[in-house]
Image: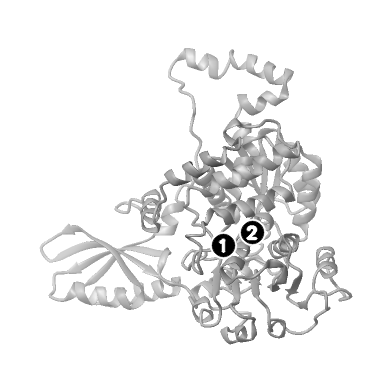
């Protein structure tokens, strides 16, 4: 997940409590759906009662839809939706409402929990089983002939089973979001969410598979054992450095794509954003100085990809300071970074490193910088503050100093979100039945993602497309397929990805209907609508 970085190991309880405190602080948050409640209130029919209730809610958050539910002689029951910056604000409001004379708090439903009731994914049959004839073909005796066909030609498993469109989402629960090591069961909602995103954006069938082990060899063996059922493996929220060995071994030992999303999807979207940010400020990547806070799994992958992109001057920081050649105690990955960056062996503070820097890239923890620290950066600085939920520097206050600002949050412009990448990466890999996902494919995906934002659209507040932009997944998928076919890594060459003549491509672009952000939000809202009258969580 974007915004995580290597931190001192803590217990699951400590990690969860730490994030809960951070969320409750609401330092840079805005009232939004992720912290919203449906309040069922029974109000006495006193003059001004509804006004007093609305005033209380308005002080604590933002008021949404309101519906009358029941009427009696002396009371009206209403459902009121309210949005908050933090759970601390909503908890405080509920206590105030309970203390208000003439108000009965009948029920409080957390809309986020309602979205998770019963899980977020399910199995549906693609073929009807309405009679004995259907049953004889879907299952025995007819299925035996299909089994023999696959036994004779194993590649037919891609077309005669769900393998060709199925991905396993694997975690050991050791690095769930910013919560840390909370275990596989507590991490399941995140893995289900990832599976839902795979289906919604890439039409990829994904299965959440949390493993009750953090033993590297046991994880590798388990994934290899279940691999025949899948067309690809997506590793998720596995702590470093274990994640490196697991991915590297599985890539060597399996003939299907293995992709650690936390590293590579983050790197692809950050690279795409950097390409476009450089265009906005009119700078060449090879001339830019970048200071990176956080060189854990995600941060390291971003640094590697930016260096491959042509960035020459990069200084990475871990929790103990700058990474430089000769510094004791570096991990193998950090030693590689030390040998390929920080050419002048800078050993000062992060604030000192920012002098004349063109870009700050944060994938660490919240508030490592103050906005005034950005004053020493070069002309038209770019700031990617991607820690979640609290960015490395307050984006609202940082806008005074930075020309381009991106965060890992969806409530600010330029949201750097992994969901822009992994559905398209796997869509392309599955479509051509690629045996692996290479660095060249990732770089092609980054350039494709950047190119989705046309010159007419490109500006300080739009360096990266919306996750709801329907051009994103096809563009990335096509880029992946082209490289796979070119390098001989594809088991097939899908005709739909054959390059069109330039004239035809231009005509296709002219005919493209682009949704406005307001239309997109309306579409998104329809997808996530929930029934509230009888739902509680």
Residue 468 lies, in percent from the top left, at 47, 52
Separation of disc 2 and disc 1 at Cα?
A: 8 Å
Q: Is residue 193 above or below residue 308?
A: above
Residue 42 lies, in percent from the top left, at 22, 65
Say which of 126 and 476 sits in front. Answer: 476
Residue 498 lies, in percent from the top left, at 61, 35
Query: Which quadrant of the structure image shows residue 378?
Result: bottom right
Q: Residue at x 51, y 69 (%)?
A: 460
Q: Is residue 94 visible?
A: yes
Marks 2 & 1, CB-CB < 8 Å contact: yes
Provide the residue designation for mark 1: 416
Q: Residue at x 59, y 84 (%)?
A: 370
Q: Residue furthest front?
A: 503
- Which numbered marker is on residue 116? none
Residue 68 lies, in percent from the top left, at 20, 59
Query: Quick one: label 2, few (<14), some, or many (20+) residues within 10 Å?
Result: many
Sequence-first tag of 2 and 1: 2
- Which numbered marker is on residue 266? 2
- Under circle 1, the secondary element is loop
Query: Quick one: label 1, few (<14), some, or many (20+) residues within 10 Å?
Result: many
Q: Is residue 126 above or below residue 213?
A: above
Query: Which quadrant of the structure image shows residue 501?
Result: top right
Quadrant of the drawing holding the C terminus? bottom left
Q: Is residue 348 left or right of residue 359?
A: right
Q: Is residue 56 above or below residue 266?
A: below
Say which of 33 and 384 sits in front. Answer: 384
Quadrant of the drawing holding the N terminus? bottom right
Q: Is residue 198 visible?
A: no
Query: Which quadrant of the structure image shows residue 336?
Result: bottom right
């Amino acid at each position: 997940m974007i915004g995580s970085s290597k931190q001192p190991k803590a217990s699951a309880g400590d990690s969860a409590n730490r994030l809960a405190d951070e969320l409750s602080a609401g330092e840079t948050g805005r009232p939004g759906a992720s912290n919203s409640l449906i309040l069922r209130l029974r109000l006495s029919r006193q003059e001004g009662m509804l006004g007093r209730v609305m005033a209380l809610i308005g002080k604590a958050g933002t008021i949404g839809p309101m519906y009358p539910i029941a009427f009696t002689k002396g009371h009206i029951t209403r459902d009121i939706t309210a949005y908050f910056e933090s759970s601390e604000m909503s908890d405080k409001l509920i206590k105030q409402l309970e203390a208000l004379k003439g108000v009965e708090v009948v029920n409080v439903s957390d809309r986020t929990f309602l979205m998770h009731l019963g899980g977020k994914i399910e199995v549906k049959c693609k073929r009807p089983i309405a009679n004995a004839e259907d049953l004889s073909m879907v299952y025995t005796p007819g299925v035996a002939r299909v089994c023999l066909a696959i036994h004779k030609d194993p590649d037919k498993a891609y077309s005669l089973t769900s393998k060709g469109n199925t991905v396993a989402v694997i975690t050991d629960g050791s690095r769930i979001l910013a919560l840390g090591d909370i275990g596989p069961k507590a991490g399941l909602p995140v893995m289900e969410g990832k599976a839902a995103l795979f289906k919604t954006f890439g039409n990829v069938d994904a299965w959440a598979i949390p493993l009750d082990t953090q033993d590297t060899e046991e994880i590798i063996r388990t994934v290899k054992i279940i691999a025949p059922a899948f067309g690809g493996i997506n590793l998720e929220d596995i702590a470093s450095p274990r994640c490196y060995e697991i991915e590297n071994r599985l890539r060597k030992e399996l003939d299907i794509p293995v992709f650690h999303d936390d590293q590579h999807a983050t790197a692809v979207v950050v690279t795409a954003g950097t390409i476009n940010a450089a265009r906005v400020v009119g700078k060449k990547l090879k001339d830019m100085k970048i200071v990176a806070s956080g060189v854990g799994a995600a941060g390291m992958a971003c640094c590697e990809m930016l260096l491959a992109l042509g960035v020459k001057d990069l200084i990475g920081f871990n929790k103990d300071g700058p990474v430089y050649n000769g510094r004791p105690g570096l991990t193998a990955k950090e030693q590689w970074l030390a040998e390929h960056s920080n050419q002048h062996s800078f050993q000062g503070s992060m604030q000192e490193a920012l002098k004349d820097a063109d870009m700050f890239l944060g994938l660490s923890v919240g508030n490592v910088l103050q906005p005034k620290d950005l004053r020493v950066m070069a002309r038209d600085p770019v700031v990617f503050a991607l820690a979640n939920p609290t960015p490395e520097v307050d984006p609202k206050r940082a806008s005074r100093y930075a020309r381009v600002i991106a965060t890992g949050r969806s409530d600010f412009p330029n949201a750097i979100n992994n969901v822009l990448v992994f559905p398209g990466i796997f869509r392309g890999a599955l479509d051509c039945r690629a045996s692996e996902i290479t660095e060249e494919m990732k770089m092609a995906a980054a350039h494709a993602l950047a190119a989705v934002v046309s010159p007419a659209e490109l500006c300080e507040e739009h360096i990266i497309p919306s996750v709801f932009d329907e051009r994103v997944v096809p563009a990335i998928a096509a880029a992946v397929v082209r490289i796979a076919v070119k390098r001989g890594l594809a088991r097939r060459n899908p005709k739909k990805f054959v390059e069109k003549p330039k004239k035809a491509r231009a005509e296709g672009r002219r005919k493209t209907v682009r949704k406005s952000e307001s239309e997109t939000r309306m579409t998104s809202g329809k997808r996530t609508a929930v029934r509230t009258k009888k739902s509680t969580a």
